[in-house]
Amino acid sequence: MRTTTPTVNIAVSWIENSIETKSRRQLGLSTVAKVLSKLDGHRRRIGWAVATSFSEGAGLTTACLVVASPEVIVIGIKEGSKQRASPGRAWSELAPWRPDATGFDKRLQDWLQSTNPDRISLPASAKSELVNELRLAHKRKAQSRYTTERNEAFLDGLDKHGKRALRPLALIDSSKNRSSSTPKPAPKTTIDPAEPLLFHENGRTFRYENGYRVYTDTKAL
């Protein structure tokens, strides 16, 4: 018989309650699990995801920020009024959201050390178990009246040159009970390894900047 540690049970329950929304679009448990699974607490320390829903014509974004160290994982989940909000828009104390900016590490440490109901911490040793439990919980909820559409997930941080490296992870669609990878990136021709990657979708080209899609052909908008 499978048993789950109390710490993981508490974390799963907290995450489930934090992502609930009246909209049919919400942050998926599988999205949180994917972000968690990609972090190692060393070079890959920061991951985040967003899901935008619409209520009475207004955009509402649920943002999830995960920061891992070799000892502790901190997960924050918060709603904001901006569409495609980065963690810096969800948590004003983290703005501007630029891991390579001067003073960012200090602001992030202050966020990690502050006590707030919109975040939870647990031992890094519990990561694998938490990922598994979130995936199982996602499967249980997949047939409910809620669906997850167009979740966007990212790894964020610095590359070996000390410049920002933002890596899109996936777009998740649980209404079909499956996940699909982000469109294959076509690297932009450049000698700068930190230059953003270009993506193609429905005949339109865009890149990610601070969690936003920036379209290269504004006439197509």
Image (cartoon, rainbow, N blue to C red):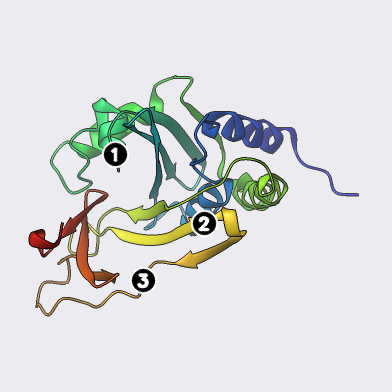
Residue 208: name its quadrant: bottom left
Residue 174 horizontal side relative to residue 199, left or right = right
**Is 161 situated above or below 81?**
below
The amino acid type found where label 1 is placed reads Gln
| Residue at left offset 40%, top offset 53% | 153
Pinpoint residue 163: horizontal percent, then vertical percent: 17, 58
| Residue at left offset 61%, top offset 34% | 16
| Residue at left offset 52%, top offset 39% | 24
Label 2, residues with CA under 10 Å away: few <14, some 14-19, many ≥20: some
The amino acid type found where label 3 is placed reads Pro
Q: From this viewpoint, is residue 163 visible?
A: no
Residue 59: name its quadrant: top left
Label 3, residues with CA under 10 Å away: few <14, some 14-19, many ≥20: some
Residue 39 horizontal side relative to residue 220, left or right = right
- Give the numbered dot on residue 163: none
Give how far apart the Cα atoms at labels 1 and 2 are: 18 Å
Residue 125 horizontal side relative to residue 41, left or right = right
Marks 1 and 3, the one that precedes in the sequence: 1
User: SS for tag 2?
Assistant: strand
- Give the numbered dot on residue 83: 1
**Residue at numbered disc 3:** 183
The front one of 150 and 93 is: 150
Pinpoint residue 50: horizontal percent, then vertical percent: 39, 44
The front one of 111 and 31 is: 31
Q: Is the C terminus in the top left, top right, bottom left or bottom right quadrant?
A: bottom left
User: SS for tag 1?
Assistant: loop
Mark 2 vs 3: CB contact within 8 A: no
Marks 1 and 2, the one that precedes in the sequence: 1
User: SS for tag 3?
Assistant: loop
Q: Residue furthest front?
A: 56
Mark 1 vs 2: CB contact within 8 A: no
**Residue at numbered disc 2:** 173
